[in-house]
């Protein structure tokens, strides 16, 4: 028995050693430069979000090592379908500036502009902001990641603060520090976005709460790259292409969601769940994303999306190309708008 336990512990230690590790997050101990302003209104078949993009919670100090940009107010006017419908086959996040928007008006933007070996941005080998602690390209070398804070947020060159993962302090406020199913935003296709927990039995609101697991897993085969335009070695999570969807391996579908009842949608809806592992924020859409989330609509003069990285000083500018893939009904009275 002791020998079996020893083997199990050794296997667990090996798995932990092989698990992808991201750069350390910076403490959110600074007040944002301004007050949070956001409104949600339903107009006809659209839910309209107007926001200055300033979070209501504390953030890290920006600029910082890994992120040379300062937070500034934005002028967002975003729209999502008030009665979203699934699209046959879904849609990717290609050419979208942001994947969705949080209830505080800060956008969800999971992808990066940083590409292996400072390559052309059309190169699909984009680094993962929350996973990569390797040298991102050759000029500049970013060994400390992209300067994300404990909210998994950092800043675009145009001053837009945005999330690459679970918005920790927003989630804590909305959940009241309790373990419960908590809506944190809306996807660009209009479906609601929850974080971490959902009902174990999707159609039973009385079932226990369960921490949702993504169905994306690290690939097992070597990357097979040439070391110049494509990386070599074993997939370790540094790149989005290190992962693949494995149906049934987790709780969520390839779009990062599931269908079921929620506190805001007691009759049921399709909904997304932000997870603690890749993809953190989904990269695809179950429905059709609204064009207000496109690059040109959000900020035609920025490099938002790509899906936007922080744009380290001194970095070689690759050509702007398309980013890698990915990046119900109206709620009842009292639901978040």
Image (spheres, rainbow, N blue to C red):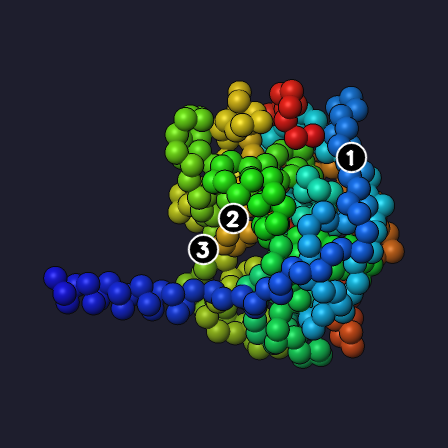
The span from disc 1 to disc 3 (Cα, nearest Å) is: 37 Å
When the figure is inspected, residue 320 is found, relative to residue 44, above or below; the finding is below
Residue 111 appears anywhere in the view: no
Residue pictured at 65% horizontal, 39% vertical: 185
When the figure is inspected, residue 51 is found, relative to residue 86, above or below; the finding is below
Q: Answer few, some or many: residues within 10 Å of disc 2's Cα (few below 14, many 20 plus, some between 14 and 19).
A: many
Q: Answer few, some or many: residues within 10 Å of disc 3's Cα (few below 14, many 20 plus, some between 14 and 19).
A: some
Q: Answer few, some or many: residues within 10 Å of disc 1's Cα (few below 14, many 20 plus, some between 14 and 19).
A: some
Check residue 217 in the rendering and tell me which mark sits there, or answer none.
Answer: 3
Q: Nearer the viewer, residue 304 or 28?
A: 28
Check residue 275 in the rendering and tell me which mark sits there, or answer none.
Answer: 2
Which secondary structure lies at badge 2?
A: loop
Q: Position of residue 63 (x, y in %)?
A: 76, 67
Q: How many marks?
A: 3
Q: Earlier in the sequence, mark 2 or mark 1?
A: 1
Q: Position of residue 241 (x, y in %)?
A: 55, 60
When the figure is inspected, residue 2 is found, relative to residue 151, above or below; the finding is below
Q: Could you tell whether 311 is left or right of 12 in the image? A: right
Discs 3/2, front:
2
The span from disc 2 to disc 1 (Cα, nearest Å) is: 26 Å
Q: Does the residue at mark 2 contact the one at mark 1 (Cβ under 8 Å)?
A: no
Q: Nearer the viewer, residue 167 or 297?
A: 167
Q: Which residue is mark 1?
A: 39
């Amino acid at each position: 028995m002791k020998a079996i336990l020893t083997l199990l512990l050794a296997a667990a230690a090996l798995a932990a050693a092989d698990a992808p590790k991201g750069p350390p997050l910076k403490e959110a101990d600074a007040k944002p430069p301004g007050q949070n302003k956001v409104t949600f209104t339903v107009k006809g078949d659209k839910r309209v979000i107007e926001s200055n993009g300033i979070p209501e919670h504390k953030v890290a100090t920006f600029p910082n090592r890994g992120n040379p940009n300062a937070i500034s107010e934005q002028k967002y006017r975003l729209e999502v379908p008030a009665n979203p419908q699934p699209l046959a086959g879904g849609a990717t996040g290609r050419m979208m500036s942001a994947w969705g928007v949080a209830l505080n008006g800060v956008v969800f933007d999971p992808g990066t502009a940083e590409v292996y070996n400072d390559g052309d941005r059309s190169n699909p080998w984009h680094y993962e902001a929350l996973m990569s602690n390797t040298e991102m390209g050759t000029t500049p070398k970013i060994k400390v990641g992209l300067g994300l804070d404990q909210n998994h947020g950092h800043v675009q060159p145009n001053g837009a603060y945005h999330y690459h993962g679970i918005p920790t302090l927003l989630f804590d406020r909305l959940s009241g520090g309790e373990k419960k199913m908590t809506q944190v935003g809306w996807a660009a296709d209009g479906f609601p976005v929850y974080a971490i927990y959902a009902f174990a039995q999707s159609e039973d609101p009385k079932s226990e709460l369960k921490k949702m697991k993504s169905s994306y897993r690290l690939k097992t085969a070597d990357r097979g790259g040439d070391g110049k335009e494509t990386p070599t070695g074993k997939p370790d999570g540094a790149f989005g292409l290190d992962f693949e969807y494995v149906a049934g391996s987790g709780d969520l579908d390839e779009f990062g969601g599931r269908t079921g009842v929620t506190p805001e949608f007691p009759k049921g809806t399709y909904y997304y769940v932000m997870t603690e592992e890749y993809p953190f924020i989904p990269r695809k859409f179950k429905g059709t994303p609204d064009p207000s989330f496109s690059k040109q609509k959000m900020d035609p003069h920025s490099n938002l999306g790509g899906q936007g990285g922080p744009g380290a000083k001194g970095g070689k500018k690759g050509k702007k190309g398309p980013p890698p893939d990915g990046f119900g009904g109206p709620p009842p009275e009292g639901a978040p708008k």
